[in-house]
Amino acid sequence: MKEKDLKRAYNNVMAQTISASHQHLFAGNSFGDIFVLKIQELDKGTEEPPGKLKIFPQGNGVDINCLAFHRDFLIVGAVGLIYGLPWNEEEETLAAKRSWEVKIPMQVDAVEVPDVNSMWLNADNDTLFAGCGDGVIYQVSLEDGRIQREYRGHTDYIHSVVGNASGQIFSGAEDGTVRVWSTKKQEQTSLLEPHKNPQLIRPDWGKWIGAVAVSEDWLLCGGGPRPSIYHLRALECTRVFDFPGRVHLCEFVDDSVFIGGEYNHVQSYTLHGELQANIPVEHTACYSVVWQTAPINLMSIAGFSNKLHILKDFRFLDSKIELYGNVQGEDNQAEDEEEELIEEPLIGEAS
Amino acid sequence: MSTAIEVVDKAPAKFANYFALEAAFKDALEKAIQQNSVELLVTAYNSFKANSEHDKRLPMDQAFRVLLMKRLDEDVQNIGDLVRLSVKATRAEIVSTTIPVVLLIDTFDVVTLDKCQEIFRFVEELVEVWKEEIFFASCKNNILRMCNDLLRRLSRTQNTVFCGRILLFLSKFFPFSERSGLNIVSEFNLDNFTEYGLDSKDSQDDNDKELEDTAEDIPLKIDYDLYCKFWSLQDFFRNPNQCYNKAQWKMFQMHAENILQSFSSFKLEDVRSSGSDNASDAGSQSMDIDVETTDPAAVATAVIKANHFFAKFLTNPKLLALQLSDSNFRRAVLVQFLILFQYLQVTVKFKIETYTLTSDQADFIKDTEPRVYKLLEETPPYGRRFARTVHHMLIREEMWNNWKNDGCKEFKKPEEPVASEEEVKPPPTKKPRRPLGDSLRDAARNGKFFLGNDNLTRLWNYSPDNLQACKSEQRNFLPLLETYLETPHDKVDPGFEWRALRLLARQTPHFFTSLSQPSSKTSDYLEQVRKRLIRDKEPKPVVMTSSHSLEHNNGLAANHGHTESVNFATESPESPAEAEPDLEVDDTEQVVDEAFEPAAYEKPLMVTKEHIEEVAPLIGEPWMKVGKKIGFSNDELLYFQMENPAANLACIKMLTNWISEDDDDATLDNWAYMLEGLEMNKAAEAVKAIIERERSGSTAAVQAAVSASDDNDVEVLSD
């Protein structure tokens, strides 16, 4: 019981992903638990509470740093390894046994096992790009689990990797650089150093880049330096966003820019830098956002708290979903107790 | 047809006559309506002298009603004409008083709602007529019935505008404090239930459930997402008394918090440009000034602009996102909050005693209400104006509420208290007031005006002729350009530059001559002008004195001759450099100039006590002018005058004061310039002579012409 309370208090959700069927949302935390939420439950439009979540523990030693979903696999990026778990859509169960594993090779001079901090999945050619704690991006073929290529250049651990269909890979790292790679070229194609731009630098918070996102024309990055967008071809900083905290997540959503991090609000800006929405969140820090537009509009923001924040139209906080304490199959008594605990802050004195 | 039946009913009494009358009246009516004059009808009516009034009225009524039935298919306007004619006929007492209303009732009974809406216009237009004594007494009930019949036919949700028109008409028609339409016991319209949820079945169940719940008094539903939270609030708005239930209040508080937070998290953008935003602010300001005139207009335009009004909320979950982004919707909900808060706070006669707010609740409302207002203000367009209007309406609502609490007293025009005040007031005001002409005459005679206040009186009598006093130089607060340019200022200070340019335009012709080096920066330009002015001042003795001698070609001419010769003598070594300022200034010359300037300006010659004693007699009586120029205030000058009755002594005292206080400005050059400005040429010359003397004295080693100038100075002084 006590452990449960501790977990609830220190739940750090680092990763989320949505299934290929767009019906389930997976959220993984640093305790190695994967929560599965049925998205339909959020769209009932009635006064009944959404159904409970399913939980699939991955064992104590597993930190879930990032998640991806491909075909019928949930891909988990943990410490020093990436593995796949088959997802059974009918029964809504995640297999306990890993169907494959890819180990991240230890560098010769490495002191600790590298984390898999960020993954970007290129579903078209079954390739996974994993940005790791050793400063290397590994290109993994999902056909055979082989590491096809290593992208070397970053001098510190990588926080964020994204790519686009034209074969460009963008990575942001602790060393303060954003590097652009091409799958067709050995060397990095270009290098950005936002911390050298006086408009962006926030000296108190360091030079690291916490998150990178790309759209068709724009590259968005932020971290210790202020979040800003760069034009993709010119690589010129065109707009600075006034997000008041350290940045751990940024995303292009429709025509706007979502930025979150160590701040009690997640903010949405227009591309012109105007603040559109200022959404209050309970997370101490936000680490992950996933969103989809079909079959229903849904965005889920996760971070250091026991709740997923659900936005249905990307502008208003719609609801908050409890994680621990809202899980199917917890024994009844515990459940009852917990139910009361949850409701207490809401209702206070019920009778 | 009802008319036919009536005819049959009434026929037996006076068979032939009735029809004859009716036929005759009908003809007359046809003509009357064509010419739109009631005279024809009256003459037709009066032509049947044999019949009694009562006998004649019925057929006349009948004629109107039959004609109406005939004309129903025609243009709506004709019906209006007929009704107006019937009003006139009623006034002429040839028909029964109810006939105009009966005509309208007949019409509304048989035409479609669309047409009703058009015809109702006549009802509205004639509202003043209905209120007249003869009509009001007899038609009151008929009109009320007519309106209620219409309202019954209309859908409250579809024909909102027409319903509103009818209600507005009723409120205009009945006296202000009429209670018949009033919700006296303050019941809520509990039927106005807002259903929500995916299918109506569900909500039906909820509805039932809720009824049970209220019976059990522990209804606890937790709503899980924004949608449910949002619409569950409507239930509180529908029945505010729920808020007095503790558990429900908690729920309300939580949801309200949530919704308001959502509203504040996503600010609506003002679609209009910022320019018109200013206009809106200006508009709102004007509203402050004149609530009555601009307010209805603004509301009207707002209504026209937002031409979509729903009497019921649409609760489809898919609409929620759109609704939350819709400023009208947002306003509607926010106003609901305000209304609820108001209800909870005010005392209402029919509220149960247990319905009182706990201090927590009161605190919550106190905190939340300003937030709601703030959100209203932030909701474009015209947010601030809207918020103020709502506030105004709510205050008015409170008034109505108090009126109701007091048992709906009749309103009286507050004439009596005003009248009584007037009765009380005049005596005290009349007694002390003398005719204005008398007091003016006295004042003119005594040379002193009494303005009823010591200070005002003192100010007014400060100078015998106030207009003249206004013209005095002392009222001229413009600083001299030279001194102004020298005052310390920021390097780039637009305010300073602007003022300097204004002074420049006023005081020197340099403003109109273009400089050789046009600079884009005003500060540079001013700096150049400053230098030029200094340069101009330098050779002033030469230029100015000669011009003076031309201007004032009077007894002083001899004097001028002397000084001129002095000047030429002393300045001959410098003349190559000094001659140029009158010519076009070139860059090279400027350099020479500047190189030269420091020598002359290194040590400004200060005024000393000896100088003052020397010059003061020359200033003489008008020493006060000099004082003003120097910058002494009136009080100070008066003080000097009082201390020293002799002008000479006062002048010396004042000038000594000046040099001891204002050590930077008190240079001989400034003084000479000042005296010249005041056209005290004698004194000016004297000062200039001192300058020459001092300067030559200080540069004695270099200058050869010292003794000559000294001699000349003596001459001048002895003059």
Image (tube, coloured by chain):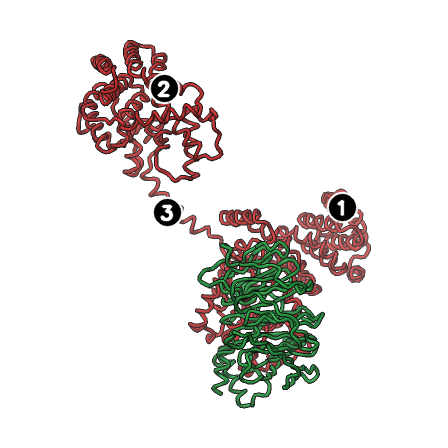
Chain colours: A green, B red
Q: Is residue B339 visible?
A: no
| Disc 3 + disc 1, Cβ < 8 Å | no
Image quarter where the N terminus of chain B lies is bottom right
State which tag comes first along the sequence, 2 or 1. Answer: 1
Q: What amino acid is at disc 1?
A: Ile
Earlier sequence position, callout 3 versus callout 2: 3
Chain designation of label 2: B
Question: Height in image: B699 above or below B15?
Answer: above
Which image quadrant is residue B167 in? bottom right
Mark number, residue A335? none
Instruction: Tell me the subunit letter for badge 3.
Output: B
Residues at marks 3 and 1, CA–CA distance in whole angstroms: 57 Å
**Which residue is outermost to the front?**
A108
Q: Which mark is residue B578?
A: 2
Q: Nearer the viewer, mark 3 or mark 2?
A: 2
B467 relative to B232 in the view: left or right: left
Nearest the eye: B536 or B365: B536
Q: In the displayed structure, would residue B75 be above or below residue A110?
A: above
In the depicted view, which residue is nearer to us: B605 or B53? B605
Residue A257 in view: yes
| Quadrant of the image containing the C terminus of chain B | top left
In the rendered image, residues at marks 3 and 1 fall on the same chain: yes
x and y percentages locating residue A277 in the rendered image: 56, 62
Graded by Cα atoms within 10 Å as few (under 14), some (14 to 19) or many (20 or more), the crowding at tag 1 reads some
What's the amino acid at mark 3? Val
Q: Which residue is mark 1?
A: B33
Instruction: Give the amino acid type for the residue marked by disc 2 in the picture.
Output: Glu
- Circle 3 residue: B424
Mark 3 and mark 1 lie on one chain; the one further toward the N terminus is 1
